[in-house]
Image (spheres, grey):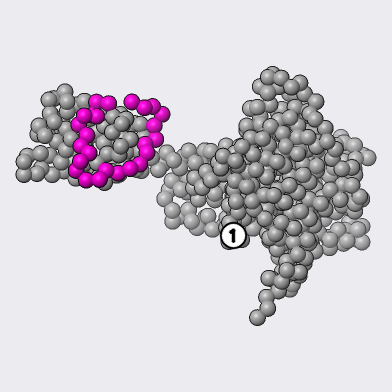
Amino acid sequence: MFDIQTNPEFRLRTDLLSGITVALALVPEAVAFSFVAGVDPLVGLYAAFMVGLITSLFGGRPGMISGATGALAVVLVALVTQHGVQYMFAAVALMGVLQILAGLFRLGKFIRMVPHPVMLGFVNGLAIVIFLAQLGQFKAPDGDGQLVWMEGTPLFTMLGLVVATMAIIHLLPKLTTVVPASLVAIVTITLATASFGLDSPTIVDYLRTMTGDAQASLAGGLPSFAIPMVPFNLETLRIILPFAAILAAVGLIESLLTLTLVDELTETRGRGNKECVAQGAANIACGFFGGMGGCAMIGQSMININSGGRGRTSGITASLSLIAFVVVASPLIEMIPVAALVGVMFMVVLGTFEWSSFRVMTKVPVSDAIVIVLVSAVTVATDLAVAVLVGVIFSALVFAWKHAKVIHAVCETNESGTKVYSLRGPLFFGSSKSFLELFDPKGDPNDVIVEFQHARVSDHSAIEAIDTLAERYLALGKILHLRHLSPECRKLLRKAGSLVEVNVIEDPKYHVATDALA
C-alpha cells in the first residue's frame, strides 16, 4: 500500500513548512541571545542564518537545526564587555578552526563516552532552561521603563494565547499532518490577535523593550565580509585563545549531544566528525561576516523533528526564511505575538523533558539517579559543558570505586608447595591498593606464582603496584613468578622484570595507559 509519508513530494513539502516554522521560532531566540552576549540583534540573526545554512548543507545530521545559542552567549559576554565586539569576531573564527581540527582528528567519537544518565540530565536540564527563558516574556515595562511581571488583563490575555497555541499544536495532528501544527498555531494566533485587536506584545515590542529604542526594527541587509579589526599579534591570540577553546568545547558538546538525541528520535545515525567540521566552517564564516557564532539548538531541532522535518531541506529553508524575514519581510514577522512563540516553546519543553526519568530513577542504581539530578541542576545553574564534564567525572569516579572492589584472587597450593594467586578483575589506579592487600609475603612459602591470565593491567598505577609487590617478595628472599603479562607490561616493569615468565601459554596483547616508560 502506498504510504504518503514516503512520498518525495510530501517529504519536500513537510520539510519546507517545517523550516518556515523553525525560522519563526529562531527570530526571538536569536534576538534574546544577542542581548545576553551584549551585541546588536542583527549579529545574532546573522549567526543563526550562517550557522544554520552551512551546517544544514554540509553537517553530519540532516534535520538538526543550528544557530545562535545561549550556551555560547554566556561565554561571549565577558569577552565583549572587556575587549569589544571585534575581538568576539576573532574568537569565533578561531573557535571554528579548533572545531574543524576536532573533526579532522576524529574527536567526535568521544561523545560515546557520555553515559546515558548524563544524557538524561542534559535533556532535562535544557528543557528547564528553555522553560525558564520563556518566563521573561511575561514581563512588561512599567512607567519607569523597568521590567515587571504582568498583571490583570495583559497577563490573562498572554496566558490565553499561550494556552490556545499549545491546544492547536496538541490537537491538530489528530486531524491532519499535512501542515506542521506549530506553523498553523503561529499563523492562527497572529491573525486572531490582529483581527480582534488583542493587546498582546509582539516580536517588535519585545525588541523595542530590550533595546529601549522606540524605532527599533528587525529590518536589515545581508551580512557583509569584513576581517576582524584586531591587532594580529601574540597579545591578541593570548586574549582570544582561552575564549575560543571554551566556545569550541561548549559548541561541540551541545551539538554532538543534540545529534545523539536526534539520532534516537529518528532511529537513524548522524556523522559526528562531519558535524564538527561543518560547525567549524560555519563559525569561521560568522567571524568574517559579523555573526556571534553558534551550534546545534535542541529546542529548534525538536520543533523541526516534531513538525516532520527530516531532511537537509528543512534546515536550509529555516536559514533562508530567517534572512528573508530580516531583508524583505520584517514588517510581517514583527506582527507575530510573543505568546504564540512562547506556546510553541512550552510544547518543546513538554516534548523534550524525559518524564520517564522519574520512573527510571527508582529502578536504576542510586549513583545513576544522582547523576541525572546533578547534571540537570548544573545545566540550569551554569552551562552545558560544565554539566556534562561534572556528570562524566562523577560517573567515572563511581565506576572506578565499584571496580576497585571487584579484584580478587583465587589461591591454591600445588603439589610442589608453590602457592598460586590467580587474579580476577581489572588492575588499575582504583584497585591497586586492594591488589597489594591480597598477598601475604611474610606468610607465603618461598615460591609464589601470580597468575594474570584472568586479569588486565590497565594503567601505570597498576605497573607500580606490581613492582611494589615484587620488591616485598625480593626483600624477603622469596621467589616470585609473574605469569601471562602483556609484552608492554613486561617492558614497563622495573623491579619485577626478571621474574616474569613468558613461556607458559600465549601471553595477552594489549596496551597499558601510562604517562611514563621504564
**Was residue 334 drawn as part of the magenta stretch in this picture?**
no
In this image, 195 relative to 313: left or right? right
**Was residue 508 drawn as part of the magenta stretch in this picture?**
yes
Q: At numbered mark 1, what does the secondary structure look like: helix, strand or loop? A: loop
In this image, 116 relative to 287: left or right? left
The residue indicated by pointer 1 is: 268
Answer few, some or many: residues within 10 Å of disc 1's Cα (few below 14, many 20 plus, some between 14 and 19).
Answer: few
Query: Quadrant where the N terminus lies?
Result: bottom right
Q: Is 276 or 412 nearer to us in this picture? A: 276
Residue at screen point 26% across, 32% down: 466
Q: Position of residue 85 (x, y in %)?
A: 78, 29
Identified by mark 1, the residue type is Thr
Q: Is 475 or 437 nearer to us in this picture? A: 475
The span shown in magenta is 494-518
| Residue 298, placed above or below residue 234 | below
Q: Determine if residue 245 is in view.
A: yes
Which SS type dominates the magenta stretch? loop
